[in-house]
């Protein structure tokens, strides 16, 4: 069963789309809080997103860009706007397809099935899972998991980004500015305490793997991940 997320502020259209999706044996997830589209996307992890352009507060282009920061999930725009530039703008913001209203629901379902085949089915490109490995400490970014010697700790999305940045530059120092830029689009109003909380969480996760004092604070510069797990393994 696939999960299809419906971001449409017309309740009649969203309910009909949900009905057709369920008719095909899949799950239709209707978004009702248009302030939390990205959060609901991350909570539900859908396989395809149906996204309208005209939405309360932020438009579909904005939410498409936000989703693209965390996922390559297929996004299909459904909109009453039928201009060429609207379709071009949708594609440039990360959309995979564009359907104009009014539409036949069977056409929408055919487009959804096409995207599912392309990304998850017979037409999908078979790729090996990406990992970041530093001497046995292995990060699985897509799973958001950190592994060492048969042990595993789960990570949040921000923790995953932070660990990946530290591992990629290990044992070099990672500047505070680089970390802030990786974790937040606009960190002007992010205070030092917020970053310290995230660093503390990473230290706790490393401790759960049996790694002590690996994440070092370099005063006035940033943070460095030392490969102390090698020495601890030898002892």
Image (cartoon, rainbow, N blue to C red):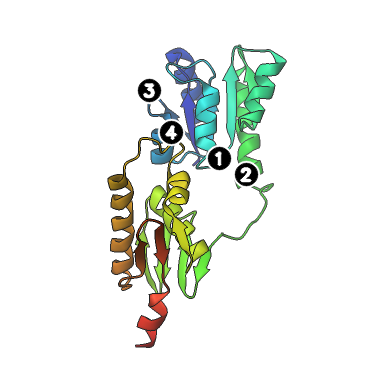
Q: Are marks 4 and 1 in contact (CB under 8 Å)?
A: no
Residue of label 1: 73
Res. 25 visible in picture: no
Q: Residue at x 40, y 72 (%)?
A: 148
Q: Does residue 215 lie above or below 175 as drawn?
A: below
Residue 186, label in figure: none
In this view, the mark in front (4 or 1): 4
Percent from the top left, x then y, of residue 157?
41, 48
How far apart marks 1 and 3 lie (CA) works out to 20 Å
Q: Is residue 235 left or right of residue 71?
A: left
Q: Residues within 10 Å of mark 3 (few under 14, many from 20)?
A: some
Nearest the eye: 21 or 92? 92
In this view, the mark in front (2 or 1): 1
- Say which element carries label 4: helix
- Which numbered disc, 4 or 2, marks the residue that appears first in the sequence? 4
Nearest the eye: 38 or 13? 38
- Which numbered disc, 2 or 1, marks the residue that appears first in the sequence? 1
Residue of label 2: 119
Residue of label 3: 32
Q: Residue at x 47, y 50 (%)?
A: 178
């Amino acid at each position: 069963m696939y999960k299809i997320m419906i971001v449409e502020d017309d309740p009649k259209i969203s309910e009909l789309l949900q009905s057709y999706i369920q008719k095909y044996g899949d799950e239709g997830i209707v978004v009702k809080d248009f302030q939390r589209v990205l959060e609901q996307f991350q909570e539900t992890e859908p396989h395809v997103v149906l996204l309208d352009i005209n939405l309360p507060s932020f438009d579909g282009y904005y939410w498409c860009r936000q989703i693209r920061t965390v996922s390559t999930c297929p996004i299909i725009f459904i909109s009453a706007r039928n201009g060429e530039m609207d379709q071009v703008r949708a594609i440039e913001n990360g959309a995979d397809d564009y359907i104009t209203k009014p539409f036949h629901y069977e056409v929408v379902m055919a487009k959804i099935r096409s995207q599912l085949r392309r990304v998850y089915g017979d037409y999908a490109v078979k790729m090996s899972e990406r990992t970041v490995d530093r001497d046995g400490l292995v990060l699985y970014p897509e799973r958001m998991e950190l592994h060492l010697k048969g042990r595993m700790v789960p990570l949040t999305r921000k923790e995953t980004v932070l660990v990946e940045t530290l591992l990629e530059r290990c044992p070099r120092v990672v500047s505070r500015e680089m970390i802030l830029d990786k974790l937040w689009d606009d960190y002007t109003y992010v205070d030092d305490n917020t970053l310290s909380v995230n660093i503390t969480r990473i230290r706790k996760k490393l401790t759960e793997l049996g790694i002590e004092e690996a994440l070092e604070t370099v005063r006035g510069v940033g943070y460095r991940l030392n490969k102390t797990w090698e020495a601890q393994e030898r002892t």
